[in-house]
Image (cartoon, coloured by chain):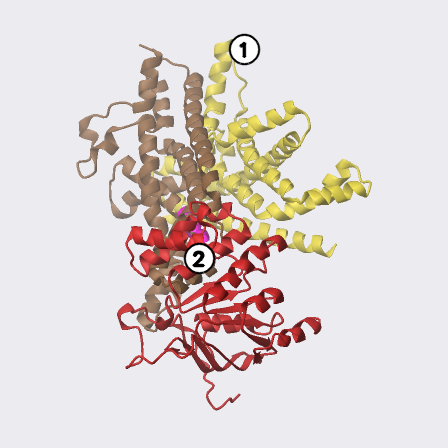
Amino acid sequence: MSVDGNVRIRPEKEAKTVRSTIPRAVEPRPIVNALQVESICKQFGERRVLDNVGFHLPQREVLALCGPSGAGKTTLLRIICGLISFDAGHVTIGNVLIPFNTCYPAGMYGQVGVIFQEHNLFPHLTAIENVTLALREFKRMPVNQAYERGMGELERMGVGALAKRYPYNLSGGERQRVAIARALAIDPLLLLLDEPTSHLDPDRVDEVCDRVVELAGAGTTMLLVTHNIKCARQAAKSFALLEDGKCQVSHDPALLDNLRYRGK
Amino acid sequence: MMTLRHVLSVLLFGYPVPPEMIDPHFPSFLQRGGGMLLTLLITGLSMLIGAILGTALALCRREKTKAASANAFDRMIGSALYSTATVLVEAVRGLPIALLILLTFHLPYRLFHLRLPDSVLAITALSFYSGAYLSEIVRAGFRSFDPSLHHVGRVLGLTPRQVLLKIELPIICRHMLPDLTNLAVTVFKDSSTLAIVAVPELTYVARQMVMSEPINYGLVLLLVLGSYWVLATVLSVLTTRTLRLLVPMHISF
Amino acid sequence: MDFARYVFAPPYWGWLCRGLGMTLIIGITSGLGSALLGFLVLRCYLSPNRLFRATGACYVMVFRNLPLLPLLLFLAFGLPEIWRQIGWGAFPRGLELALLLLGLSFNTGAYLAEILRAGAEAVAPSQTEAARTLGLMPGTIRRRVVYPQAVRIMAPALASRFIHNMKNSTLALVVPLPLESMELLGQAGRIAGQTFSWAEPLIFVTSVYLLLAHGLGRLLNYWAANEHARILAA
C-alpha cells in the first residue's frame, strides 16, 4: 500500500528513557497549536483504520471528537498518547514532533494529561496520593508543595473533601473528577478525555460534564472524545467527526447531527 | 516426673542436644532447638528462602527470558534458564512432600558424600517446596496486573522503573498476600512430615517422649494435633480478617 | 547407583509394582470416600437446619487445619492407646488400612467440601430461581441445573485436590501396614531396609510419581474438557 510513499510499517518499539536528553528542536519552535495532527494513516493488517486524519487544536480551545464506535477514535487517541505507532503523517504536541515508530516517545512525558473511561486511578493510593504521585516523582516537588497543589486541584474539581478516600470508596463520577484533577496537576499542555462519562450512571454524567464545561470556560486546552453530544456542544469550540477512518472538522455543531441521525 | 509442665516444655523446646552432635559449620541455633520452636523456625526460614527462590524462578519463567535479546548466546542462556526453572517447579509441584523430604535427606550423601545437619536439610526441602508454589503465585500475580494502569502511570510522566516500584509492585503484593499466607500455613502443617526423617520437630519430639518416658501416646498426640490446629486456625483467621480490608486496594476501578 | 540390582531385580520389582497398585487403590478409594464426605458436608452447609450447618462448618474448620501426618499417627497409634486406657479392651488389629483411608478421606473431604461449596455458590442464584418458576422440585434443580454448572466451574480445583490426595497416600509410611499392602513409597523404604540403599528406589519412585501426577492431571483435564463440551452441546 502506498500513501505518499511514506508508509513504513515498523515494529512497536519503546523509546529509551533518557530524561536528560528529551528531544527538542535545536532552537525551540514557538508553540503554534497545542496539538497538531496531520495526515495520520494507520493500518492494521488489511484494514485501514485511519486514513489521512488531520486536525489542529489551538491552545486554550476545546475540540470535540465524535464518531461511531469502531471508527478509529480509540486508535487515534492511542497514537496521540504515544501508546502505538502510526504509519504515516505527523503528530506534534506543543513544539515537539512525535516520532512515528516508537511508543512512549520521550517528548510527551507529562505533556498530555489523559483521562480514560475507567481504570484511571491507582487503587492502592488515596485520592490525594493519586494526585501527588506524579508531582513528587515526575516533577520532583517537595511533599508539602505537592500536597498543596494536589488539594488545590481536587477542590477545583469539587472533590476536596474526598482527598483521603480510596478509589473503591468513591463513586464513578468522583473517580473521574479525581482523575481529571490528577491530570491537571502536572500542568499539561493539553488534556485528552477519552469518553469520560460513558461508563458512568446517567445521574453521574452531569457531575463530570459540568466540570468539563467549567474547565473549557477557564481556558484549558482539551481534546474531548465523547458520545455525549450535549456535553460536546457546551464545551467545545470545534468539532471533528471520525467515520470509516476519515475525519471531518468544522466549527459548526451541526456536523454532529450527522452522527445521530445515521442511527449508529 | 510426668507433669504437664514437663510435657509442654518438651513439646515446645524439644530435648537438649549433646554438643558433639552440633556441626560447627552451620548455625548452632538451628541444631540445638526442637519441638514447636524448631517447627516455627523451619517454617519461617523456609518461607524466607522460598520467597527468594520463588521470585527467582518466577523471573526465569517469564517470556522475556526465553526469547529476549538479539544476542544468540543470551537467548540460549535465557531458554536454558527458562527450561530449568520450569522443570524444577513442575517436578516439585508434582511430588509428594514425603518423597521430596526423603530425596533431600538421602541424595546429598549418596551422590556427593555431603553430610549436612538435619535441620539444614529440612529447611532446604521445605524451601524448594514453598519456592515452587511461590513462583506460581508470583507469576499469577504479575499476570493479573491491569496493563492500562501501566499506561496511566507512563502518561503521567513516570519512568518504567517508577511505575514498577510505585504502582505495579504495591498492587501485586497486596494481591498476592492471601495466597502467601495460605502457603505459609500449608508449609507449617506439612512440616510435620519431617518426622519421617527424625528431625526433632513437634511430631517427632512427641514420639521421642513417648519412647523414653511413660506417657500415653494418644494424649500426647492429641496435644500435638491441638497445637497445630490452634496455630493454623489462628493464623488463617487473623490473616483473612486483616486481608479483607486490603482487598479493594488491588482491584482496579 | 545400581538400578539393576536394587530396583529392577526380581523381588524388589514385584514389591514396587504391588506398591504402585496399592497407591492407586488407596488414592481412588480415599478419593471416593472424600467425595462422599464432601458431598455430605455440602448438603449440611446448605441445609436450613442450623445444627447441620454448624456440624458441617465445624468439620471443615477442624479438618482443614489439622496436618495429615499427626492425624494418621493418632489414628494408628493414639487411638488404640486411648481405647485401652478407657478400658474397652484391646483395639482390634488389622484395621490399619481402614484407618489410613479414613484419615485421608477426612482430610481431603474437608477441602473438597469448601471447593464444592464455592462451586455451588458460584452458580448464579437466578438459575435456581428460574428453575423454581418452571415448577421443578428442589432436588431436581440441584441435580440438573446447579451441579452440572458447578462441576464445570470447579473442575480444575477438584482435579488438583484429587491429585494431592493421591500424593498424600505416601504418608502411609507412618502407619504400620502389613508388608504386602504397603504403598509405593513404603515399598521403597522396605527395599532400602534390606539393601541399605535409599537412593535408587527413591529416584525410581520419584519418576513414577511425576508420571502419575502429570498423567492424572492431563487425564482429568481431558475429561473436564470433554464434559464441558458435552454440557455446552447439550
Please count the marks in the image: 2
Q: Position of residue B184 (x, y in %)?
A: 40, 38
- The amino acid at mark 2 is Ala
Kindly identify which numbered label has been placed on residue A181: 2
Q: Residue placed at 35% from the left, 46% from the top?
A: B51
Residue B212 falls within the magenta-colored stretch: no
Residue that mark 1 sits on: C88
Residues marked 1 and 2, same chain: no
In the rendered image, the vertical position of residue B230 relative to residue B128, given as above or below: above
Which residue is situated farthest in the bottom direction here? A4
User: According to the rendering, which colour does chain A have?
Assistant: red
User: Which quadrant is the C terminus of chain A positioned in?
Assistant: bottom right
Give the structural element (helix, strand or loop) at label 2: helix
In this orientation, does residue C99 appear?
yes
**Residue C140's quadrant in the figure?**
top right
Q: Nearer the viewer, residue C199 or A222?
A: A222
Mark 2 neighbour density, 10 Å: few (under 14) some (14–19) many (20 or more): many
Magenta segment, prevailing SS (helix, strand or loop): helix
Q: Residue placed at 58% from the left, 76% from the top?
A: A242
Q: Position of residue C192 (x, y in %)?
A: 38, 38
Q: Nearer the viewer, residue A238 or C215?
A: A238
> A115 left or right of C109?
left
Q: Position of residue A109 (x, y in %)?
A: 37, 67
Residue B141 falls within the magenta-colored stretch: yes
User: According to the rendering, which colour does chain C have?
Assistant: yellow
In this orientation, does residue B253 appear?
no
User: According to the rendering, which colour does chain B have?
Assistant: brown
Kindly identify which numbered label has been placed on residue B234: none
Give the structural element (helix, strand or loop) at label 1: loop
- The span picked out in magenta is B134-142
Q: Position of residue A223 (x, y in %)?
A: 50, 70
Q: Residue placed at 57% from the left, 60% from the top?
A: A197
